[in-house]
């Protein structure tokens, strides 16, 4: 992994068992920023904005350092009726900026017939984001990728006799017309007092810096502007840093490597703290497929700007030949590593999944790509799925975002310091993975002891030595065990209202009532008993066990509220057990930041009151800082019955024998055609009976196994899915399912010898079957109840 100078830090490999490893004291010495703070021209002398500006070390919001958190949502892949709920869910999950591609092919498939109505109304989308309280980054392209046909070029653009993605005047003339059209749609919606704070030019363009500069000129001429202009910098991209901020990515797995490839180093590296931000793996398949060349040596972030990301893994798309399914912790581990490594901007791709428009708009081998993607499905295993279901990654990331919202002003200027003892290589399962961000006096210690595919052992005997300015901090008093799966952000010398917390072995989650009587909220780690250390003279009231020398142990099986009082002030400390931290929402409301517990989706409505949906009666509790406890939130909702029930599914046609291959390109298996599925798939008729489908949110949950499944409603194919072991969630209204609809599922068997890569659990099920795999296990109807908070 990389040290402060960017070279690989090595250590001699120690001995360890597969069950646990202990390395004794873990040390790091605070290292300040190497260069003095600068103010680059971007957002300072050029494109100044009323709220946002860049420095060389961090972003600044309303004059205060901040860490923006952006999440990708594609408005053209969602029904317009779902926009507001998804945006409010994103905001409730800690997203502060919405990033979205503007796919040219979605808007203007036929030359001269551009559409901006319905879910293509980008202007309405930007205005709605502003109403919800979210900023926006527009990813203009005109080449976007996004797993879209031609990278987002309409077919007529792709076929034009021009040098695409260059400064060919004929190509630039086409782009100029398109940018001008976008400019008309966004007239008055970009500029110094708007919520459009970023514009990305092109995507994954590696060797055309002058073209990016020219695209910026064309966008400006079209009336588009933002304080931050960006370009993707991975793959050692040569980009004009005076014109654009380099943005990076990080995926822990990907569909773009070969089906039988082992866990690639470009994925594995993201499970370590590092000051290397480039990733040669993202887009490598397209780069090599279309140009025949790999990436140049990796590049570093510009000294003009802080490290920034736009594509941290929110999930992963599913290609036919390789089908990753990252867990919530897989996603959260990558994100935590980037924060601890010094991220100044957290950006996720995707954060909200969607559905491709009809017409074969997806990336496919038929249009020259090495991969076949589903025709419709773009769920991406995102934190918010295509049907609005929350994936486990949502709760995991929500905790990190709450931390950034509460402590970002302190964290953003802090440089990252890597420990003295670094992992020897990506194969090292013994050296604890951790980092520190500090200003020399206080800071946060980040631990990520999780990775997929190759599990880590429990780490025993962990004790830390942190060398800060004028102080050496050793903790805890005795070595503790850090269980595999731990993802933590421990405060160090944190001051709240005159109370100093020397250290804690529980994660900083949020801060309530920062302008009044504050409550510091800590989240216990699963398997670690929380310990807090406070200076001599600090009085602690509450259910704690004193261990001596200012250290207290807390039984955090239930929420515990303490009061710490020093000569300078008093603060409450709420410690949540780990299982409740997974239900915690830190919500920005008209009444200030509130801490709410709910296992189901919720958000803040336009009226400032809580709203959400649940299966059955809502179970929502809000923390009262005055009472020092959680109290029930009164909600009003009509509860439909039944809320969840199985639906009969009759097999009306058995599957036929399928070939081991439907073809290939560049050595990668091709997906079956629609006609092959029609000919060979098993067909099931789903009986809706007297099901109530009039609610705001009703889902079909399909448990199945095979190769490819398609949903056919009244004779029309409206959805598809490649099997990876995960359930298929379908929102009935969005799929056009009405009372009386003829609903059928087609399931194509997965041939025993088909060359497709599956997650381990799915592969085990495949291996357990002697021949081809095909099964419809269960179809369930789930009715969600919408609710709103009753007025006080």
Image (cartoon, rainbow, N blue to C red):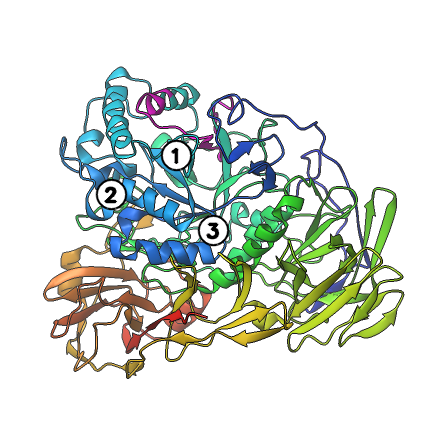
- Give the main secondary structure, helix, strand or loop, of the magenta stretch: loop
Rendered view: 536 above or below 579: above
Confirm or deny contact between disc 1 and disc 3 (CB under 8 A): no
Left or right, 16 with respect to 770, comes to right
Left or right, 655 with respect to 584, comes to left
Q: Mark 3 points at which residue?
A: 95
Left or right, 474 with respect to 770, comes to right
* Separation of residues labelled 1 and 2 (CA atoms): 22 Å
Q: What secondary structure is marked by label 2?
A: loop
Q: Mark 2 points at which residue?
A: 121
Q: Which of 332 and 451 is in front in this view?
A: 332
Residue 717 appears in the picture as rendered: yes
Label placed on residue 93: none
Q: Name the residue under label 1.
A: 203
For image coordinates 59% across by 34% down, the residue present is 306
For image coordinates 32% across by 67% down, the residue present is 728
Residue 36 placed where, x, y %? 70, 27
**Which portion, as a residue range, is magenta?**
217-242
Mark 1 against mark 2, which lies toward the viewer?
Answer: 2
Residue 305 placed where, x, y %? 58, 30
Q: How many labels does the image show?
A: 3
Mark 1 against mark 3, which lies toward the viewer?
Answer: 3
Q: What secondary structure is marked by label 1?
A: loop
Residue 79 appears in the picture as rendered: no
């Amino acid at each position: 992994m990389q040290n402060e100078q960017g070279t690989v830090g090595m250590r001699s490999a120690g001995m360890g068992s597969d069950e646990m490893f202990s390395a004794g004291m873990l040390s790091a010495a605070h290292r300040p920023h190497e260069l003095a703070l600068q103010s680059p021209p971007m957002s300072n002398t050029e494109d100044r904005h009323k709220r946002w500006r860049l420095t060389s070390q961090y972003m600044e919001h309303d004059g205060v350092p901040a860490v923006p958190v952006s999440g990708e949502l594609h408005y053209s892949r969602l029904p317009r009726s779902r926009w507001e709920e998804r945006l409010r869910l994103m905001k409730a999950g800690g997203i502060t900026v919405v990033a979205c591609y503007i796919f040219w092919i979605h808007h203007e498939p036929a030359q001269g017939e551009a559409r901006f109505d319905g879910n293509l109304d980008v202007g309405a989308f930007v205005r709605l984001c502003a109403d919800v309280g979210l900023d926006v980054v527009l990813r203009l392209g005109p080449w976007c990728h996004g797993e879209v046909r031609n990278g987002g070029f309409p077919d007529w653009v792709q076929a034009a006799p021009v040098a695409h993605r260059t400064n060919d005047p004929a190509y630039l003339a086409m782009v100029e017309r398109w940018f001008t059209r976008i400019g008309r749609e966004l007239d008055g919606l970009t500029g110094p007092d708007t919520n459009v704070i970023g514009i990305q030019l092109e995507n994954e363009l590696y060797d055309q810096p002058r073209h990016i500069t020219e695209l910026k000129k064309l966008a400006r001429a079209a009336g588009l502007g933002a304080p931050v202009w960006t370009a993707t910098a991975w793959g050692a991209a040569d980009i004009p840093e005076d014109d654009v901020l380099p943005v990076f990515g990080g995926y822990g797995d990907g569909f773009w490597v070969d089906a039988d490839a082992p866990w690639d180093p470009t994925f594995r590296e993201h499970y370590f703290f590092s000051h290397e931000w480039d990733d040669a793996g993202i887009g490598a398949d397209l780069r090599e497929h279309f140009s025949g060349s790999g990436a140049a040596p990796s590049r570093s972030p510009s000294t003009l700007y802080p490290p920034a990301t736009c594509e941290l893994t929110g999930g992963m798309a599913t290609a036919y030949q390789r089908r990753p399914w990252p867990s919530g912790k897989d996603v959260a581990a990558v994100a935590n590593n980037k924060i601890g490594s010094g991220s100044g901007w957290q950006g996720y791709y995707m954060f909200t999944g969607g559905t491709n428009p009809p017409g074969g708009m997806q990336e496919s081998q038929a249009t020259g790509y090495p991969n076949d993607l589903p025709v419709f499905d773009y769920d991406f295993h995102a934190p918010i799925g295509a049907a609005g279901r929350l994936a486990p990654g949502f709760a995991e990331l929500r905790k990190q975002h709450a931390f950034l919202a509460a402590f970002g002003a302190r964290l953003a200027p802090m440089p990252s310091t890597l420990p003295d003892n670094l992992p020897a290589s990506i194969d090292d399962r013994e050296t604890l993975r951790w980092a520190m961000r500090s200003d020399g006096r206080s800071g946060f210690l980040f631990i990520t002891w999780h990775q997929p595919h190759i599990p880590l052992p429990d780490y025993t005997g962990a004790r830390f030595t942190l060398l800060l300015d004028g102080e050496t901090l050793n903790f805890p008093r005795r070595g503790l065990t850090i269980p595999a799966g731990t993802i933590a952000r421990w405060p160090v010398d944190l001051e709240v209202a005159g109370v100093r917390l020397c250290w804690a072995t529980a994660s900083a989650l949020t801060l309530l009532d920062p302008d009044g009587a504050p409550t510091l909220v800590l989240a216990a780690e699963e398997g670690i008993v929380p310990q807090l250390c406070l200076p001599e003279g600090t009085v602690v009231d509450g259910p704690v066990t004193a261990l001596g020398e200012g250290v207290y142990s807390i039984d955090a099986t239930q929420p515990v509220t303490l009061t710490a009082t020093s000569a300078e002030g008093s603060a409450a400390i709420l410690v949540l057990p780990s299982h409740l931290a997974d239900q915690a929402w830190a919500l920005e409301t008209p009444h200030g930041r509130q801490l709410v517990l709910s296992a189901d989706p919720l958000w803040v409505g336009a009226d400032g009151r809580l709203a959400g949906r649940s299966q059955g009666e809502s179970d929502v509790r809000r923390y009262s800082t005055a009472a020092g406890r959680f109290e029930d939130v009164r909600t009003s909702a009509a509860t439909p019955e039944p809320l969840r029930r199985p639906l009969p599914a009759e097999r009306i046609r058995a599957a036929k024998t399928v070939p081991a291959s439907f073809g290939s390109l560049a050595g990668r298996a091709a997906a079956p055609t629609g006609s092959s599925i029609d000919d060979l798939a098993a067909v099931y008729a789903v009986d809706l009976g007297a099901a109530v489908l009039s609610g705001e949110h009703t889902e079909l949950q399909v448990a199945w196994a095979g190769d490819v499944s398609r949903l056919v409603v009244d004779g029309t194919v409206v959805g598809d899915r490649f099997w990876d072991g995960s359930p298929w969630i379908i929102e009935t209204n969005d799929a056009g399912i009405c009372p009386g609809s003829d609903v059928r599922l087609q399931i194509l068997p997965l041939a025993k010898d088909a060359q497709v890569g599956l997650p381990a659990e799915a592969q085990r099920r495949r291996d357990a079957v002697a021949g081809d795999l095909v099964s419809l296990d269960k179809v369930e109807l789930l009715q969600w109840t919408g609710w709103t908070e009753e007025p006080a």
